[in-house]
Image (spheres, rainbow, N blue to C red):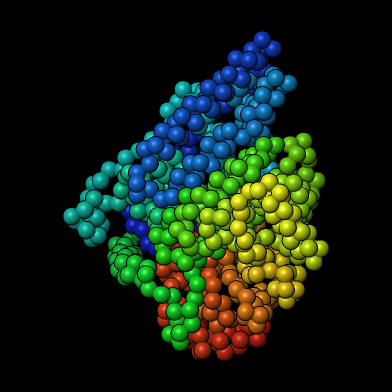
Amino acid sequence: MTFSIAGLAVARGISIGRAVLVGASRVEVAHYFIEPGQIESEIDRVRCGRNAVVEEIQRLQEDIPADAPQELTALLDVHLMLLQDEMLTSGVKHWITDRLYNAEWALTTQLEVIGRQFDEMEDEYLRERKADLEQVVERILRHMKGVAHPVVPQSPRRKTQQDLMLDDTIDVPLVLVAHDLSPADLLQFKKSVFAGFVTDVGGKTSHTAIVARSMDIPAVVGARTGSQLVRQDDWVIIDGDAGVVIVDPSPILLAEYGFRQRQIEVERERLTRLRHTPSVTIDGERVELLANIEMPQDAAAAVAAGALGVGLFRTEFLFMGRVGNLPDEEEQYRSYREAVEGMQGLPITIRTIDIGADKPLDKGHKDTSTNPALGLRAIRWSLADPGMFRTQLRALLRAAAHGKVNILFPMLAHPVEVEQTLAQVRLAQAELDARGAVHAPVRLGAMIEVPAAALMVRYFLRHFDFLSIGTNDLIQYTLAIDRTDEAVAHLYDPMHPAVLRLVADVIAAGREQGKSVSVCGETAGDVTMTRLLLGLGLRSFSMYPSQILPVKQEVLRADTRKLAGWARDLIEADGLAASAQSAPR
């Protein structure tokens, strides 16, 4: 019987195939106390398990095929960093030494401790890294228990009448259905014939979502009990546009979605021809399409997608799992230089660390904040530790000697924060000059992601060379909505009149003063919002590389002269009876 499962749409498109179930593979953990004389042997068991996983991931990295997405390589690097996290290893030693827990119990206990810190993180991308930590710990447990990593059962390729309706000359593609998929799993499955992913857990920035977008493969995450409802070898349709999984579809539904799938494939092939086409509207307005990247290795994907540069390079990856052992200037410089050189002369905007009180510098610090979103995060966190902040600034200034670098500061809201930030930049430059280190001039920019900054936009424009609107946080702070909270997520609305007015005012102020304003939140890569943003005057978009060509197509079809009046009317219609879909053609 046909039924559907709702989840989160994270990679657009249609996939049709047979379900291959990746069963939950949690290792059962025994809980018992050990004798004091067993402490060293238990610690050694954990160490051996961790080392085995490190070697396993390193072997995977060596065998990565040339056509594997850069994001997959980067996520494996994240797993290696988590394995070497001092907080994980020292915590496990504590539970074994002080509490006399057996090795497995100590490992899972420390996982819970660190997991709670991830849960409290405001940044969605960092919060999703909890799943990576869980997978790392599970792999250690499996090695300790001598159990091989789970292998996906092969789906029988039997032909049915429905098979023949699709194509009687090719094997039926596979759809992976799992509670979750690790980067190592995704690398293994890359060698198989598959059409898409479905996972019970995960969000828009989970590793499955990141890889699916980079590979342009339809995926639905957050399907909750999907892996329990779908049976092995069921026919499955993934509607990546709607975030819906259809199980055991009727022949009529199969035919309908098969037709839609072929249309999408033809459209994608046509889009690839636009890669080198200048992004110019019908009325001659040039539009800058930039890429958001997470790791230095992602620069190659940005260039390949035809991006004119990077509008947002997050630096959090360097600091993840490094509590008490933050990266020094040299390590940061090497990473930033790799990203800069990877852009082959194109400009790259690097954001200073956007992290909060939910991941403090001091391992012994206990976060007492009741609302991390309003606490010591982003630029506030950096200014609270000027030494750490200037270390990052010096590394960025040195990397600028190798290409065009812009530095972007997150979550500025107060004039005093602006003054302190600019003062730290001058100090970092002076420190480099004092030791004769090579560095280069950079453009400085501010993120507009809290209403206070949007309302003070003209002050910000007096002090910065460019602005970047972070729509994800701006929507959240303007509407007082946590989009990860299922009880209120439906109220998270990028089309809310208040949000649109703030965005419009920032863009207009930038144009008045001849300074660049870009949008780097999810709204920038949403093709249903492209015409509205163009109508509001936006001429710089930054998004995932895979979203560039669909957005470029919208730009090429747009006439900003017609869109400007429509966008203005849309903002003034407080009830918003119209929508972004009603844009004039």
540 or 370: nearer the viewer? 540
| Residue closest to the far left | 169
**Along the line of sight, which residue is nearer the eye, 13 or 365?**
365
Whole-percent x, y for residue 497 in the image: 66, 78
Residue 181 visible in the picture: no
In the image, what residue occupies the spot 51% across and 52% down? 339
Q: Is residue 489 above or below residue 388?
A: below
How many numbered marks appear? 0
Quadrant including the C terminus: bottom left
User: Residue 268, how many percent across, how many down?
Assistant: 34, 66
| Quarter of the view holding residue 571 | bottom right
Q: Residue at x 64, y 41 (%)?
A: 328
- Judged left or right of residue 246, residue 435 is right
**Residue 120 percent across, percent down from the top left:** 69, 48
Residue that appears at 78% across and 44% down: 367
The N terminus - image quarter: bottom left
Give the camera-side residue of 82 and 238.
Answer: 82
Decide if residue 347 is on the left or right side of residue 474: left
Q: Residue at x 40, y 43 (%)?
A: 187
Q: Is residue 262 above or below residue 342?
A: below
Q: Quadrant of residue 217?
A: bottom left
In the displayed structure, does residue 568 sit left or right of residue 237?
A: right
Find residue 74 and report its horizontal and vertical position in percent.
49, 46
Q: Nearer the viewer, residue 374 or 8?
A: 374
User: Is residue 328 something that shows in the picture?
Assistant: yes
